[in-house]
Amino acid sequence: MEIYKDLNSSEKQQFANLLNSQSKNKIEEGKIFEATVTKISPKYCWVYLDGLKSEPAIDINEIKEMNLFDQIKEGSKIKIVVENLESKSGEIIVSASKAKKIEGWNKLLDKYEKNEVIKIKIKSKIKGGYVCEESETKHLLFMPASQLSNRPTKESFNVINTEMDVKIIQADRKRANLCCSRRELITENKKGDKIKIFDKYNVGDRVDDAIIKSITDWGLFFEINGEIDALCHSSCCSYQRIENLNDMFEVGQKIPVEVISIDDKKLQIGVSIKALLKNPFDNIDNYKVGNTYKVTVKKILAYGVFCELEDSLIALLHQSEISWTEKNPFPKNYFKLDQKIDAQILSIDKETQRVSISYKLTQENPYETVSKTFSKDDPIDVTVSDKNDSGLFVKLPGVGLDAYLHQNQLSWSGNGKDQMDKINKGEKIKVKIVDISVENRKILVSKKALEQDPMNFWSQKKVDDILTTKVISVDKRGLIVKPEGSDFEVFIKKNQIAIQSEDARSERFTVSDRVDAAITEISMEKRKVSLSIKRVEEINNEIAIKNYSDLSSGKSLPFANLSEKLDNKDKKDKDK
């Protein structure tokens, strides 16, 4: 314990200051330092770094892989990175190759941020691109196959071991990965030249010898004066509709075009062939709305047909103007390509240069034929062609049109839905036309119009008229009765059977009973009639009051007070 006796002595203070001065030169893991080679053996190379407690060793194979074996000797300087200050075995781990990689990464990252050009050598081909080596730092980069050139290249294009200038376009700092591009450099070099060429052209310029470079579904790519490319969209190739551009144009063909658009940002030029052609719409004054002309079917689509009035002058025949009878006809069922048909011009729009025509207007309107052929008062024999939830479709004879018979028009009485279910497709029935709409293309028919309207029975009747009726059915809610001489059924509610509530019982009646009932409501417009047995009693009471001044008149007649005597007897029996 004697050694720790005096910690505040001057000798101890000097020793502490010495340690502190050495610790100021801090060695941190992951940092690059310049070390001095102290010894080289067949297996290791020892280096000295001020601040380390011992001299770390570097594997001699690492030095050879870096091509430094012939360059270093004792006393030479070499850059290392400290990986571990103290491993599990107590050794200091350093690496010269990793120091070189980190330095190379930092250099390339600096060039990426400054957008500088670097020189690389393509080492090998991998999936999606190439592995490249930067010439100075020997750092590996990745080049996507699409970034090798600004034009598509064949797979057999030999670029392995080829040196070229590129630019770094992407850096992943976490993974220390770099992506380079030759295409970016080529594009930048060409852009400067392209701007100078681009400034030569203006909208409206004519190019007489534009050469077709390629043909696509959407247009033609031209080479103008051998210095710049231009696009001619398919809509600008001709005034007539072209199904396939390959049928009309060939690669290498020279065609005069006119510059119609210039995009300063994208450095793109748009040209047009038809801008130099005569506009067929200039002859549109030769055609009048409402007149019929011969047209040629040029293209058939689902929504209509494009027809040619004359060379390159196109008109649209919409599907709604094809047939009178079909709402959405399929044009291919009516027309063929190059077929000549009659069509009437519906409209001409000079601003949009569009013409619409109609085929059905040149055909006889079958709905007008129906209105001329059939009278609304005459019965017609029709055939049921189809059904839906609310009615029947029936085929009119001789015209090939369907008319609609709603279930409410089957009969004046009964449930229309039930009656409709009894009628089958193909069955013949007799109907009467009740409405023909030429504009809406609708024909309505009725079966019950052939029968006498049961409401006519009530036309001469009035409220409080008393009728003799026959009971048709009885239930807890009331009675269904039919007046004698009428087929009109009326429901009498339970509360309309009698004045006294104890007598207002529907079970008092049976089917086929004859009972008098008074009219309480009648409406010819609403087709509504209400009857009441109770009202008959009220009317009789009113007559009794009028004739005898008292409802008790007649009580002196035999048995007139029998009910009262029986009631009194029941009370006496209860009191006992």
Image (cartoon, helix red, strand yellow):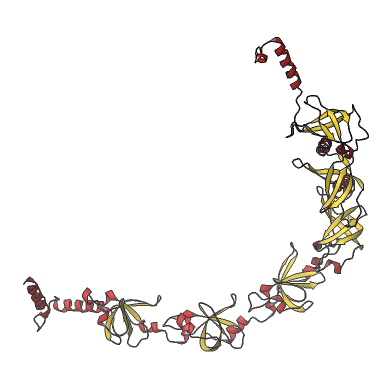
Most foreground residue, 421 or 130: 130
Q: Using the rendered image of the protein, determine whether residue 199 is visible from the camera's viewpoint.
A: no
Horizontal and vertical percent position of residue 30: 76, 33
Q: Residue at x 67, y 74 (%)?
A: 321
Q: Residue furthest top?
A: 10
Q: Is residue 42 above or below residue 426?
A: above
Q: Using the rendered image of the protein, determine whether residue 363 is visible from the camera's viewpoint.
A: yes
Q: Is residue 7 above or below residue 541?
A: above
Work out which quarter of the rendered image holds the N terminus and state it: top right
Q: Residue at x 73, y 15 (%)?
A: 15
* Residue 334 location, quadrant: bottom right
Horizontal and vertical percent position of residue 70: 93, 35
Q: Is 162 positioned to the left or the right of 438 in the image?
A: right
Q: Residue furthest left?
A: 576
Q: Residue at x 86, y 34 (%)?
A: 44
Q: Is 442 positioned to the left or the right of 170 in the image?
A: left
Q: Is residue 4 above or below residue 30?
A: above
Most foreground residue, 14 or 237: 14
Work out which quarter of the rendered image holds the C terminus and state it: bottom left
Most foreground residue, 557 or 437: 557
Horizontal and vertical percent position of residue 258: 86, 57
* Residue 171 location, quadrant: top right
Most foreground residue, 542 or 303: 303
Total marks shown come to 0
Horizontal and vertical percent position of residue 509: 26, 83
